[in-house]
Every structure is written in structure tokens, then in C-alpha cells.
Amino acid sequence: MPSAATLAGMGKGKTLQLRDGTEWEGAMSIDVRQAPRPGRRDEEVDVLIVGAGPSGSVAAKHLSAAGFSVVSLEQGHFPDRNAYAGRRPEWELVSQKQWHPNPNVRDLPRDYPIETSESDINPLMFAGVGGSTTLYAAHWTPFLPSDFRTRSLDGVGDDWPFTYEDLLPYLDEIEREVGVSGMPGNPAYPPHGSYPTPPLPIGKIGYKAAQGLDKLGWHWWPGTNAIPSVPYNGLNACVRRGTCMTGCPEGAKSTSDITYWPHAIKNGARLVTGARVREIEVNDNGFATGAVYIDANGREHRQRASVIILCANGIGTPRLLLLSRSKRFPDGLANGSGLVGKRLMMHPFSAVLGVYEEDLESWRGPFGQNVDSLQFYETDEKRGFVRGAKWGAFPAGGPLGATAFVGSKVFVGDEANVEESWGENLHRTVERRFGHSVVWGIIGEDLPEESNRVVLDPVLTDSDGIPAPKILYKFSENSQKLLQFHVARCLEATKAAGAIETLVVHQMRDTGWHLLGTCRMGDSSATSVVDQWGRAHDVPNLYIFDGSSFPTSGGVNPTATIMSVALRQTRHLIAERRSQEAA
Amino acid sequence: MIDALQRKTFLAIADVLIPAAEGMPAASQVGVGDEVLDRILSLRDDLREPFVRGIAAAAGKEPQAAVEALNRHDPEALGAIGLVASGAYYMSPRVRALIGYPGQEKRPGNPDEIPEYVANGMLQQVIDRGPIYRPTPK
């Protein structure tokens, strides 16, 4: 075994000399004022992070605060709040193109295309600092205890290497950094402390949704959202504009460009935007040495680092590993298990629209969740499927939203024709639905299957000529039964609330917001890509901190859990820096 | 640039799609063929090609028949024309006033206010029904 340097000197709050054999034994106190200076482009840094979304931002802030020299490469740019369309009258029109969550629809140069002809769900994402949270609805729904034990409880998926209780302290810390708003006491979770900001108003649509559930004696809870109700950590208070999913022009939706990067940069972290990584390089000893990236002008660069952390989401991360083939790693980097790219989970999704007589002002925000329900989240074998789903109640948006949901025209009849969609019927539809609608989004748990996977497309490339990912994904029988059951119950709740019209969009295609599982964590190098701390079994100085590492998907929006897991892994890396091997 | 003939054809098609009915004005009555048309095609450049193609196919035809023909033979073009027309229509202040839509305006809540669902006991009922999460083995 060749000798390897260790990172014993990392994180001491000084400019570090990691490979010269010396160890500085100075004070270990963390002081951002003593943070290392930002490195030059050609300088080797302690930690290179690929991707400045939720997980990468957590790592960048906390590693830099602990004194590590950090460079983050982000293919997108720093968001410009003034570019978000929510304040402008054309908001609905541009939300169907420029701000659509599907990169294939947006077709912007910083997006990479994704081949989806063999996928039942289109993956959704956004390239930029803050990552896909730029366009998320900010539902803050941590995984439940059972999500970490699906094998033990239900005989499906895999148990995680750690438990809900293990993750809870990190979740608490992340919630304080993110500025979550919510009401404590939700009986769908074990007892949990209060949130840093009070709950947002649930609005008339939230009351309407809750009334139906109450009539049936079913669970509901005021929405918990990564949207503060009062100014918090650089965020403004939510003003309920309702355009969360096209970027918040108020700066009131928690995204890491606001809540994390100002801290990380102050700590000395260097953020390189417009930097598209095409390969992780390794040396003859099998250690990662750095990344090759292409800047916005098409020039190629190398960034060397002692430790590399991939945070490029459940498609971007396996894509990069598969792109990083070498003589030593002919099947892709860290792919000794053959599982890189496999077990993709994207959450099957259906939506139920309920229309009511009353004016519900259903264009008002937040376009986070106004209320949610976890009534049918846990397994009941009598239903004919395992695991469950979360329901979240949304407003319906503006008048174009009478037939559309999140930028896609879906609420039209099966026999949609000119007469049905236009003419006098257009006026009747808008009069009946606009302002009077509640949309339930149903997120079902996706079970891991190796046949659902990310591969490299042999033809399609991004704007830099790098092979694009291709998705192979089919709805499972369990997913189909799960969604059918939940839609039927949701229709009951909608009608119990007094709906005069209901529409269902079943197994909606443009709903792959949650990209999970493609580099699963586990104890065995034969059956997993990374260990419980996110370290690649095959490459001792390569880590994955994003949702790729999730063994199972849960049936809730995953950002809270992604960020909490990233903090757990980051803290471990900091604590174990003396034993961390490097090239 | 959309010329006068294209604009005229568009307005005729738009009035088939969005006629004066149900107390609402027709598309042409709220100026969907004015500057807003150019603005929308500028904002949504992806719509321009199918829009222009559809308008060319409809030129000189009876509008209702043109719409039906587009629906049969070029639904993408009809979709583009329809989206431009409805987008412009619902951006019109007059239309917004008629349907009671102020736009996506600011209406902040009061975070110090006790929510009605707490004050009226609704949420207490949910709590009283007890925990629903599934305890897990360690």
C-alpha cells in the first residue's frame, strides 16, 4: 500500500501546508476572522466541492468555518433576484419556459440536457448557486423514523446505516440555519422542538383543505416551510406573493445563496461559478487529485484538492463518476459495486385539483405547502402495497393556472379539444376555477430498483460537448397501486371539503424534483458506493454528500434530510481530519 | 416583427379562442394584438416559430374554420397562438379587474397573530387524535 499524506493540519484556522509533512499544533478555536485566504486558481486546496446546491453549501460553510481551505465549482451562476419574474405580469407565461423546472424545457446554456425518452418521469433541476432549491417549493418535511428502517419494518428497500434519532441533532441545527417556519407539535413526527420562525398563514385554501380532512378524522398540519415568516439569517419575511417555484423575488425563500454562501465566503471559501466539471482525476494510487472543469468561456482548468466532495444531485453526481473513467477505474470512479447510477428514485407524483364555490383567493402564497397530511404515510398491508405518501396543499396560481400546474398544462380533460378548452368554455373554466381551487400534490415513496438508473447517453452532449445523462426509469407496480390508493383517498377528502369539481393528473411526468439513490450508502463495498459518512468505498478521499447517497427515498420532499445528512457527514470529516488520507 | 396582416389574422383567431361571452370581453377588445403581442413573442421566443407558422396557415381563411384546421393538422401552432392570446388576455388590467385578480401581489401575514386554527380548536383535534408515526427499532 503506497503511503499517503494525511490531512492532519486541516481546519486549524490558518493557511495550511498539508503536504509538506509539517503539522501546525496551534489553537483549534474556530474564528472566521482567522479563516484561510481564498486560494489561487492553481493552488491545491483542502477540500473541493462540486456543486453549490443545498448539500454543497452546507459543506462549504461548515468546512470553511472550521478552517479548511475550500473551493466550490458550480456550473451555474449566482442568482439575480431581480431576474425572477414573480413581480411581473408575464409571470405565468415565463414560468412555462424560462423558469420551468425541467432543464430540457428551459434549454439554457448552463443547463445540461437529459435524455428522457425511456423514463416515465422527467428529472427536474436548476444549475446555479442554491441549486434546484432556486425553483423548489420549500416544503420542509424531514424523513420520518420509519424511512430509515424500511427493510426491518416492511421488508423492502434497505435500512439506513443510521437512524432518525441519530440525524435529529443535525436537523435541528440545519433548521436554525435555514430559517424554517412552522408550528411545533405535529403528531406525525416524534416530539420535536419549535421552529426558528412562526408558521406562515395557511390561507383560505389551507382551511378548506383542512376542513375536508377534519371531517374524515384524518391528519393535517399547518405547512412547515423553508420560508421564514420574519426576517432571518439574511432572508426577508415572506410576503405571500405565491411565486416561490420560479425564484423568490423577495429573497424570502431559503436558498443557500442567501443563507449559506455569504457565511462561507466570509470564512474564506472560494466559489467559482460557470464552472462545469467534466472529470474527477485520480493518481496511480487510486486517490482523487482534483477536478477538470470548463469555464463559461470554454476554457479548461484543473482544481487540485486533498479531498473532493460531490454534491451535484442524484443525476449530476453519478454522471460525473461515470465520466471519470480511467485505467484504474474502467467502469467509472468509485464504481466497484457497479451501483453508480443505479437505484434512481424520483418520487411518483399525482395531483388532485378541487374546485369550490367559495372564493379562496387561491393565487395567494406561499407556494410552499399551506397544509400537509401524513395520514396514510405508513404501511398498511391491507392496501396491497407498501409504504406511503405525503399530501401537500398548494394554491393554484393565476388564471393560466386554471389548467396548469407548475408550468405544465395538465388540468384539462382526457378529450381536450378546441370547444372544451377555448371559446365560452374558457371563460366558464376560469370563472369556476380561478381563485376557487386547491391543489393537493401527492408524493409517493419510490422503492429502489437497480433497473431505474442514470447512464451516459452515447449521442447527446451538453454545450461543452460532455456526454449528457440518460434516464431509464419505470413506475413500479407498487408505485402505481400506491398512487391509485392515495388519489382515491384524496378525492374523498376533497369532496368532504365540498368540492364542486375535481380533476386528477395521475403519475404526472414533470415531477422529478427529488433525485435520490444513485450512489447509495452502506456498510459493504459490494453493495454500496459510499459508507455511512459519505466516503467512497473505492476512493478514500472522495465523498458524496448529496441525495445520491440515500438508500431509500422516503415519501416526502427530501431537502431537509439532504441538508441534515450533509451536515452530519461534514462534521465527521472535520472531526476525523487527522486520519483522512489524501493523495 | 409581426406585420399588420399577421396581426389581423391573429386577432381574428384570438377572438374565436376568446370570444365576448359570459360577461367577458373578446380578446381583440383588450388589445391582445397591440404591443403586448410583441412583448410576449420577445419573452417567449420559443413560441414565435409555431405562432408565425399557424398564422400563415390561417391567413385568408374563415377564422373558425382556420382554428379547426389548425387543431387537426398543426396543434402545436394552435397551442402557441392560444398561449400568446390567453397570456396577453390575462395580463390585461381590464380582464384582471373583471375576474378579480390583482396579480401576484404582496400581502404579508402577521406572524404575531394567533392562527385561527389554534384559536378555534381545529388543530387541537388533530393533536388529540394522537401520534400517527410508526415507532422504529433501534
Image (tube, rainbow, N blue to C red):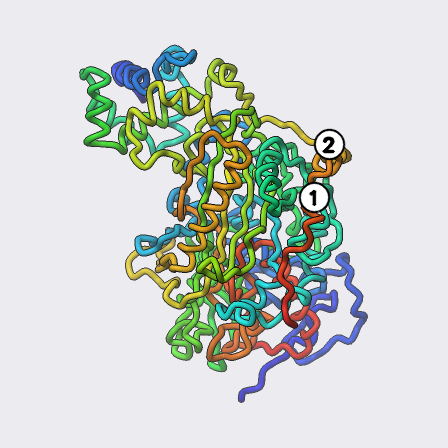
Q: In this rendering, does residue A296 appear at all?
A: no
* Above or below for B56 versus A565: above
Kindly report which numbered mark, 2 or 1, lies closer to the viewer in this rendering: 1
Read off the residue under disc 1: B125
Q: Quadrant of residue A145?
A: bottom right
Q: In this rendering, does residue A364 appear at all?
A: yes
Read off the residue under disc 2: B110
| Residue drawn 55% across the image and 44% down it | A392
Q: Chain of mark 1?
A: B
Q: Secondary structure at mark 1?
A: helix
x, y percent for residue B91: 46, 21
Please name whichever residue, B89 or A386, is drawn nearer the observer in this view of the structure: A386
How would you rate the neighbour count of disc 1 (Cα within 10 Å): few for under 14, some for 14-19, many for 20 or more?
A: some
Q: Secondary structure at mark 2?
A: loop
Relative placement, left or right, of B23 versus A22 is left
How would you rate the neighbour count of disc 2 (Cα within 10 Å): few for under 14, some for 14-19, many for 20 or more?
A: some
* Above or below for A446 versus A407: below
| Residue drawn 52% across the image and 15% down it | B97
x, y percent for residue A482: 45, 55
Relative placement, left or right, of A353 versus A249 is left
